[in-house]
Image (cartoon, grey):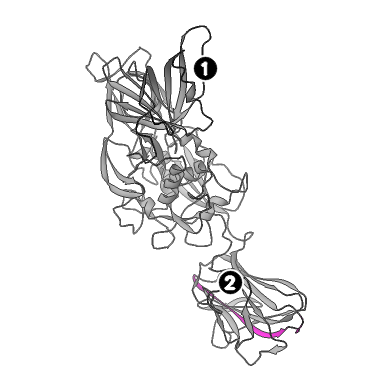
Amino acid sequence: MITTTTPENPKYRAEYKSIDGDVLRLDIWDKDYTGQTIEIQGKTQHIYSERKDIFEPIIPSTLGIFLEANNDLTLSDLYSENERQFTVNFYRNDQIIFFGYLLPDGIWEDFVSDRWEVSLNAVDGLSILKNLSFVTDEGYKYSNKITQFTAVRQCLKRIGYELPINISNLLPTYEGFDSTDTVLKSVLINADRFYQDDRKRELMDCDEVLKSILELYNATVIQMHGEWWIFRAIDVKDEMTFYRYETGEKTGEIIWNAGVEIGSHIDRFEIFHCNANQKKSITPSTQAFRVNYKYGTVRSIYKNENFVLGEGLYADGWHIEGFNGSCVPQPDGKGVMFINDNIDLNSVPLWIHNTDIISIVEGDNLNVVFRLTSTTGGGILSYNFQTNNFVFTENGWVEKNTANQFTKINKSYPQQAAIAETFSLGSMPETGGLNIAIYITLIYVPDWGTPFNFDGIDVIPNASANLKGEFHTAQRLTRISSVTKNDKVVNNGDSVSDIYYGTLYKETGEPTTLWNRPGEVTAKPLLRIMVEDILRISPRPMYFFEGDVCGYYPYLAKVQINNVPGVFQVAKYNFDTVRNINRNTFREYATEYLIEGTDFIYEPTIDFGAVTKVTIVK
């Protein structure tokens, strides 16, 4: 099923047979066309971008189209400034092979001959994700937490059509995960993480967002048979199970048979070597690999920092008590203002405090900023900060007891002051909850003046004091090669703290900490699994095989080559549909788990902001 708006009939259709008798059909659809289908002559070539890294997260495909034109049928109407005007379906024996947009590059008309060839390309859309900002269908930024599935689906939808999404059931899952859906439906991410790119622009593009999610799992997305497929290269096997989603909803599970055998024509292999250009070579394994998780900081870790009011003086997350008419909501509904003149409140408990827990983790370094404004008024405010067992004083955190638990820090504000009172609370003394209370001790508001305004509270990480991120490094203990891969930077990962944008969350809202690969008992951080898999897939120097093959096979394949040891995946795919020949290359891969301490060592380290590069130390 392809969800898109199309007319009743394709505008053009080219039908032909391959040299081996396969029936091939090309349909070109014009979204504004209402007539009958025009039969034309043509042929195609199906191509996937070359995969130099077997874990490449996005692999676009194209359909090279070659059509016969003449003076009566110039096909010049296929040129359109709107690249989404024409869509293309390509079938082999009534099985859809490709769906995409027509890019009319290369159209020309011969002034000498009365017949000529028109060449065009159709793209599946993955290659244009770089040009599409990550926004909702209405063009707005996402906010708050969204699931990884929502982000993946939206990136693919932004191409302009919605295809079914098939997701492998072998993605790692977080500890405690219990669902028959893909884990991507249960993992939550801070959408604001995608709008923190200060290098180039405000919005991340869909290519960056899609990669940032898939790379965490070492997963890949392709279009195959007119649908999206998400899988891990290291998990490719003869029979694979995928969860199937249409318009975002699960419709069942499907089995994909990926096994392909290639040999010689003499040995009666259905798919066989041809053109006598086969050769094999050796590629080195990766000796060490490091991933760098950049935490990202959160503007505020507590709700309603702008003190948006509901009915009366109700503010979500905050309680306002005992003001007896001395304060009212600000006109825009954000914050409160004190309106009485010379209020002496020493004997009256007028105060503001949080009602929901402000979650903290021991070692988090926080600032609390109180925003107040006044052009004529002034006053004295007192502040109290408590955790479960500690209270904050002028000398820092001290253990709490009945005598000191309401220790207040007094601040006096002169008339005509613009105020952003910042308390640097330093390193949190324990994991648990932070409580904040503001006591109004004295307010001076002249009758003719502007009220003293309380605008809001920000509870934010101290950007200079908190950690920048972490490194996860895996290195072989056996010296096989001198090859190291460049550090991979990722935007998300596990964390016990909620102060970072990059934190991944369980469906329950708790940060993720440990994950399991299918069938593996020991739980590990997700990024540790990522770096281990980079070493797993090539535990030794691996074969690289190239040469033409006769016979059709799909891109997602576990390839076995007769008389060549090992199993392979497609690295380069260029299928000539007329000659039924694929000009391809294959990369060998392995799937066995490695043993820590025997095969490799793993080292997590903190990123303090210095530029580093992984090096071989053994």
- Say few, some or many: other residues with alpha carbon within 10 Å of mark 2 (under 14 / 14 to 19 / 20 or more): many
Name of the residue lying farthest toward the front? 35
Q: Which residue is mark 1?
A: 108
Q: Secondary structure at mark 1?
A: loop
Q: Which residue is mark 2?
A: 307
Residues rendered magenta in the picture = 430-448
**Residue at image point 68% right, 73% down:** 372
Name of the residue lying farthest toward the top? 112
Q: Secondary structure at mark 2?
A: loop
Q: Nearer the viewer, residue 38 or 532?
A: 38
Residue 172 visible to an observer of this rendering: yes
x and y percent of residue 328 in the render?
A: 62, 80
Say what amino acid the circle numbered 2 marks: Phe
Say what amino acid the circle numbered 1 marks: Trp
Q: Is residue 547 left or right of residue 200?
A: left
Q: Earlier in the sequence, mark 2 or mark 1?
A: 1
Q: Nearer the viewer, residue 185 or 220?
A: 185
x and y percent of residue 40 in the render?
A: 37, 18
x and y percent of residue 580 in the render?
A: 32, 18
229 vs 441: above or below: above
Is 436 contained in the magenta span?
A: yes
203 vs 107: above or below: below
Residue 484 visible to an observer of this rendering: no
Name of the residue lying farthest toward the left? 268
**Residue at image point 76% right, 80% down:** 449
- Say few, some or many: other residues with alpha carbon within 10 Å of mark 1 (under 14 / 14 to 19 / 20 or more): some
